[in-house]
Image (cartoon, rainbow, N blue to C red):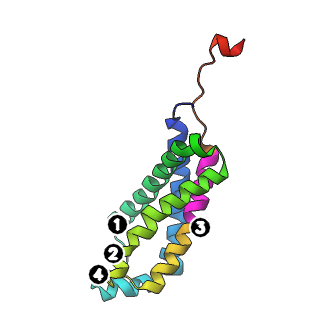
Amino acid sequence: MGQLNWKRLILGGLLAGLIIDASEVLVNGVIFQADWASVMEGLHKSPTLSPKQMIVMNLWGFATGITMMWLYASIRPRYGAGPKTAVIAGCAMWLTNYALGNVFPVVTHIFPLPLSMITVSIGLVEAVVAAVIGAWVYQEASQPVSRAAAA
């Protein structure tokens, strides 16, 4: 089992984060923008994100991507390298970061259930696609070959 290749892990994580951020902008900032604006107005909040809020949301996407690639790299020894393991990592990240993260706002009626169900479901596709593409970049650091193994 090789060591984590932090350079590739971060690179794959940033790529996955870019996919997550692009998807979030398209889904929540374009397709469901009016729905989310209505929710925010109902909460007496601004219907648009401030530049600081946009920065934080983009950082969330990159942190999610990097964490997902760390998870992928960590479970590779058990499940093997490749898309199947990336899908497992993406699903695990979706469960912890998307699905469970939306329980409180839905249960307390801060977010409407139908809108949350749609966007969280789309988030599953987003997380899996980001994980598979991010994992494509990741490779474990090579270990030096011993003389005994080479002989």
Q: What is the distance, in whole Å, between disc 1 and disc 4 at their CAs? A: 13 Å
The residues colored magenta run: 126-136
Marked residue nearer the N-terminal end (2 or 4): 4
Q: What is the distance, in whole Å, between disc 2 and disc 3 at their CAs? A: 22 Å
Circle 4: residue type: Lys
Marked residue nearer the N-terminal end (2 or 3): 2
- Label 4 belongs to which residue? 45
Residue contact at pointers 1 and 4, CB within 8 angstroms: no
Q: Is residue 141 above or below residue 90?
A: above
Q: Is residue 5 above or below residue 87?
A: above
Q: Main secondary structure of the magenta part?
A: helix
Q: Quadrant of residue 19?
A: bottom right
Marked residue nearer the N-terminal end (4 or 3): 4
Circle 1: residue type: Gln
- Label 2 belongs to which residue? 104
Residue contact at pointers 2 and 3, CB within 8 angstroms: no
Which residue appears farthest toward the left when viewing the image?
44
Q: Is residue 120 above or below residue 68?
A: below
Marked residue nearer the N-terminal end (1 or 2): 1
As helix, strand or loop, the secondary structure at mark 1 comes to: helix
Give the foreground label among 4 and 3. Answer: 3
Residue 18 x %, y %: 53, 57
Which residue appears farthest toward the front when viewing the image?
78
Circle 2: residue type: Phe
Circle 3: residue type: Val
- Label 1 belongs to which residue? 53
- Label 3 belongs to which residue? 125
Looking at the image, can residue 133 be seen? no
Q: Quadrant of the C terminus?
A: top right
**Disc ID at residue 20:** none
The residue shown at (70%, 14%) is 150
